[in-house]
Image (cartoon, rainbow, N blue to C red):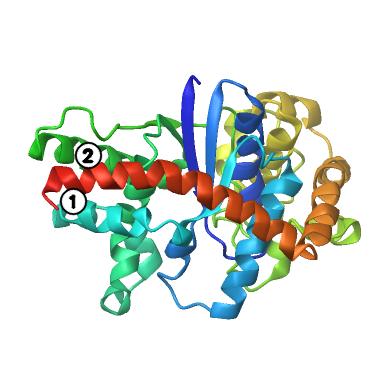
Amino acid sequence: MDKKIFSGVQPTGNLHLGNYLGALKNFVELNNDDANQCIFCVVDLHAITVKHEPNELKNNIRETVASFIASGINPKKSIIFNQSSVAAHSEGAWILSCVARMGWLNRMTQFKEKAGKDKEKASIGLYSYPVLMAADILLYDSTHVPVGDDQKQHLELCRDIAQKFNKDFGVNDFLKAPEPLIQKEFSRIMSLKDGLKKMSKSELSDLSRINLTDEKDQIINKIKKAKTDPLPMPKDVQELKERPEAQNLLGIYSSLNNSSLENSVNKFSGKNFSEFKDELSELLVNKISPISKEIKKLIKEQAYLDSILLDGVEKANKIASKKIKNMKEIVGF
């Protein structure tokens, strides 16, 4: 195996186009490459850092697994499991939190964004979750981690923690510092109602996102109502800097079509938005509708989804339990 790849997705329910283009589509490509050993984790421990409904969480874990499989990830080829079922993640997070430093965590910009103005009321879990994320990755000797722009800082922290642990305990290269895997030609997917805000399930309007469970008519309607500007389609990529909504829609088209942003801009240069939206809708329907149908079918097959998780937990536990046993011996337990 050339690469050992670890990645996690939070089971927040209602995964959307941003999750698909930012993570799942890439996971499928990594899964299909025989040179890769892939571990895909449903990070349910991360999901409880904010207020949540326990019964919903159980359903969301299954829905996330269903979304993995519906998108094209082969559970026989990759390990798919939920984090809370492998005790080494919690144990590793505690050991590594005693290695990580407050100053490092204080520099994490995502905590400031997620905690908002009143960070005193945020949970300690929300503050320290990058350390748990480091444990997730390091337990499997991961060589590469797919990351978006918003997670690069966390991967740097993971590398810092690995290097400090190795140095503090004199165990050269025991914890492997992973490399980032950054998607080429990928645009961050923004809200259909505001090109400056990330697409999110927490936004009140359902028209702001394409859900992976949306039907054909819903997709067409959402693209039709997606915010644009009064100008024709841009003539070149430079023009997009001042036009966030146009940039977002063209970025979605490019990501789905596996083409460069420049090629997409050239294709629609000077045309009306309505013509472009028709093509974008057709492309979205062709890509998302089959996934939507498969997710809805799989969600009804709870026993099948649970069997995938059980199998994944067994495989993940074999790897992680050995690593945590060695970590405990190293620190003197």
Residue 323 is tagged as none
- Counting from the top left corner in percent of width and height, residue 327 is at 22, 44
Q: Nearer the viewer, residue 192 or 92?
A: 92
On screen, 168 above or below 52? above
Image quadrant assignment for residue 305: bottom right
- Counting from the top left corner in percent of width and height, residue 291 is at 80, 49
Residue 15 seen in the figure: no
Q: Residue at x 15, y 50 (%)?
A: 99
Task: Give the amino acid at mark 2.
Answer: Asp
Q: Say what secondary structure mark 2 lies in.
A: helix
Image quadrant assignment for residue 149: top left
On screen, 97 above or below 238? below
Q: Residue at x 52, y 40 (%)?
A: 39
Residue under circle 1? Answer: 100
Residue under circle 2? Answer: 160
Cβ atoms under marks 2 and 1 closer than 8 Å: yes
Q: Is residue 38 left or right of residue 288?
A: left
User: Neighbour class for label 2 at 10 Å: few (<14), some, many (≥20)?
Assistant: some
Spatial CA span between label 2 and label 1: 8 Å
Residue 38 seen in the figure: yes
Q: Residue at x 82, y 53 (%)?
A: 294
Q: Nearer the viewer, residue 323 or 257?
A: 323
User: Neighbour class for label 1 at 10 Å: few (<14), some, many (≥20)?
Assistant: many
Q: Say what secondary structure mark 1 lies in.
A: loop
Image quadrant assignment for residue 233: top right
Q: Residue at x 63, y 43 (%)?
A: 24
- Counting from the top left corner in percent of width and height, residue 52 is at 51, 77
